[in-house]
């Protein structure tokens, strides 16, 4: 148990250790009870800011690199490890806890506040985020995670020293008070990030604002409450440092719009017409006017390329329409392009489209480039659009309601899409199929990701569906890669799209409807060749992917 020090007489200097740091209560400008409350309030705010920095790094890494599980694991594990190192390193600063805490908070505000802009700048101006761990952008992500974790870890020992200097208490009680304020602050920061900062300020401005709050609170706590614990030179240095940090953060906030435009130009080129942040994702439309092909990017990934989207959508839709097709369900497809191909077939009575992002549907209806490309499919009275999650919507759909189900969803390798490629999801799709109905699934590139592709096929079979795999070639299938930026990056992009046609009663055969419209690109010969090419890559014995054990 820590022995309490005798109370300091008014006006007397604090007790000093052999190393020159105060070890007992310091004269405060407020009563000890008020001082203790202010320290705990500072702990609360600093903890909230620290968690915002962590969540921002996770969110930005997932947005730029995909695979949110991997990015969250990397960022959080590095940060927790660094927090331990920071706590150890802070032991050397305990004799000068006030000055050390002030310096740590100013540095943390600068590093955490500028992290999002720095990471996005590296992504925009250096390009590819894939590949080995030694690539530059990923190293920058790890470096920011490490630096932020070191600084957050250094806070706790210093705050423990400061709260003990305000009023001595037993170590257990001090730890309980400190961690209670820390955890409650983390709760507030964790809730503020998705519900306040992101929707109202965006990723870049939100974290800059957090850094400013961090600098103000940290500096005010030390300079206001513990100023007598600092030399005159230390006070001026800390004040000047915080002013510089705030000036940098304020300047970045003023220039953030220009920075975003410049970064977007570096990523997408100069022909961006629409760039918006929906409740679900960032949506960017490039081209689509004056004869230029339209490209649609969602969260930085090319989803639709006007140069070869017809190859993809014809291969996705037409083989599934060879048979009864009066009632069609499209899962995804908010761009209206799959619906365009469905509506070309005579005998279609109803098309239901389930899309997660209402903004994509709005652009498909109103944007001149995208609505012209989909031939105003959403203006057809037979088309009905439902906004919602495909998995949840299927759970409430009536059984045997559709002749055709078209799964026009993002690549299965993207973590957010994993549940939409699970055995449970395909079981729900099988339930809504009418007798003789078919389901077709976009399963990612065959050539570059055969294991993922054949895992999708194995999962469909595990759901009780007979399957027929096939593929279609394109100049660059951008559904699983980042923006199409340079010839070198295009050479690494997948060169094909993989599909699986499935039915509940028997194994279907990919073919074109003899009585249907003739596709502009797809032919019976190319479809048969695509079936043979896909089967040649088969990987037997792959287990099915489920909700509790995803395999992608």
Image (cartoon, rainbow, N blue to C red):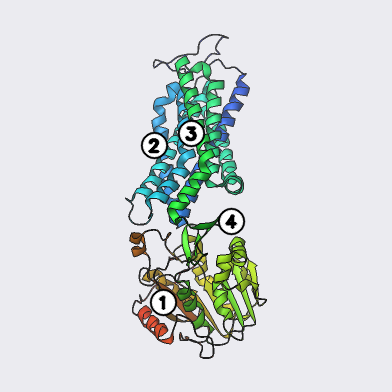
* Marks 2 and 4, how far apart at CA: 39 Å
> CB atoms at circles 2 and 4 under 8 Å apart?
no
Name the residue carrying label 3. 248
Label 3: state its secondary structure: helix
Of callouts 4 and 1, the N-terminal one: 4
Of callouts 2 and 4, the N-terminal one: 2
* Marks 4 and 1, how far apart at CA: 31 Å
Of callouts 3 and 2, the N-terminal one: 2
Name the residue carrying label 4. 278
> CB atoms at circles 2 and 1 under 8 Å apart?
no
Vertical position of residue 285 compared to residue 425: above or below:
above
Of callouts 2 and 1, the N-terminal one: 2
Label 2: state its secondary structure: helix
Residue 21, percent from left and from top: 44, 18
Name the residue carrying label 1. 472
Label 1: state its secondary structure: strand
Specify the quadrant that holds the C terminus.
Answer: bottom left
- Residue drawn at the location 42% of the way across and 74% of the way down: 498
Horizontally, residue 184 falls left or right of residue 550, namely: right
Of callouts 3 and 4, the N-terminal one: 3
Horizontally, residue 482 falls left or right of residue 257, namely: left
Which residue sits furthest bottom? 514
Vertical position of residue 378 compared to residue 63: above or below:
below
């Amino acid at each position: 148990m820590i022995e309490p020090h005798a109370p300091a007489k008014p006006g007397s200097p604090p007790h000093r250790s052999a190393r020159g740091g105060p070890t007992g209560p310091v004269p405060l400008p407020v009563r000890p009870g008020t001082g203790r409350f202010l320290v705990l309030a500072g702990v609360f705010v600093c903890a909230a800011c620290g968690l915002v920095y962590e969540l921002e790094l996770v969110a930005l890494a997932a947005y730029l690199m995909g695979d949110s599980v991997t990015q969250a694991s990397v960022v959080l594990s590095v940060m927790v490890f660094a927090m331990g190192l920071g706590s150890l390193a802070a032991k050397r600063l305990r004799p000068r806890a006030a000055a050390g805490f002030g310096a740590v908070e100013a540095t943390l505000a600068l590093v955490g506040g500028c992290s999002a802009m720095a990471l996005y700048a590296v992504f925009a101006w250096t390009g590819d985020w894939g590949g080995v761990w030694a690539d530059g952008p990923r190293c920058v992500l790890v470096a920011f995670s490490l630096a932020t974790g070191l600084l957050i870890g250094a806070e706790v020992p210093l705050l423990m020293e400061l709260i003990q200097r305000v009023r001595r208490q037993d170590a257990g009680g001090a730890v309980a008070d400190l961690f209670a304020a820390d955890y409650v602050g983390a709760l507030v920061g964790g809730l503020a990030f998705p519900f306040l900062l992101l929707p109202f300020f965006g990723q870049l401005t939100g974290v800059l604002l957090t850094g400013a709050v961090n600098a103000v609170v940290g500096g005010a706590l030390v300079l206001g409450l513990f100023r007598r614990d600092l030399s005159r030179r230390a006070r001026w240095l800390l004040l000047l440092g915080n002013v510089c940090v705030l000036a940098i953060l304020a300047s970045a906030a003023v220039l953030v719009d220009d920075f975003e435009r410049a970064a977007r130009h570096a990523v997408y080129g100069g022909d961006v017409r629409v760039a918006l942040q929906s409740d679900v994702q960032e949506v960017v439309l490039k081209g689509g006017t004056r004869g230029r092909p339209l490209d649609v990017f969602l969260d930085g990934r090319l989803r639709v390329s006007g140069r070869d989207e017809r190859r993809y959508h014809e291969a996705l839709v037409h083989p599934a329409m060879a048979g009864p097709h009066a009632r069609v369900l499209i899962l995804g497809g908010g761009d209206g392009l799959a619906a365009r191909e469905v509506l070309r077939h005579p005998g279609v009575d109803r098309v239901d489209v389930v899309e997660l992002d209402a903004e994509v549907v709005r652009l498909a209806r109103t944007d001149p480039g995208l609505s012209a490309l989909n031939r105003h499919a959403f203006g057809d009275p037979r088309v009905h659009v439902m906004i919602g999650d495909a998995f949840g919507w299927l759970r409430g759909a009536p059984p045997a309601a559709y002749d055709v189900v078209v799964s026009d969803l993002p690549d299965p390798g993207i973590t957010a899409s994993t549940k939409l490629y699970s055995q449970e999801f395909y079981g729900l799709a099988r339930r809504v199929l009418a007798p003789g109905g078919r389901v077709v699934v976009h399963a990612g590139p065959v050539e570059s990701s055969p294991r993922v592709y054949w895992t999708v096929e194995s999962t469909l079979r595990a759901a009780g569906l007979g399957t027929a795999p096939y593929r279609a070639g394109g100049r660059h299938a951008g559904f699983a890669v980042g923006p199409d930026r340079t010839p070198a990056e295009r050479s690494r992009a997948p060169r094909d799209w993989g599909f699986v046609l499935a039915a509940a009663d028997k194994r279907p055969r990919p073919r074109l409807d003899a009585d249907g419209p003739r596709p502009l690109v797809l032919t019976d010969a190319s479809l048969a060749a695509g079936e043979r090419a896909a089967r040649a890559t088969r990987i037997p014995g792959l287990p099915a992917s489920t909700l509790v054990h995803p395999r992608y």
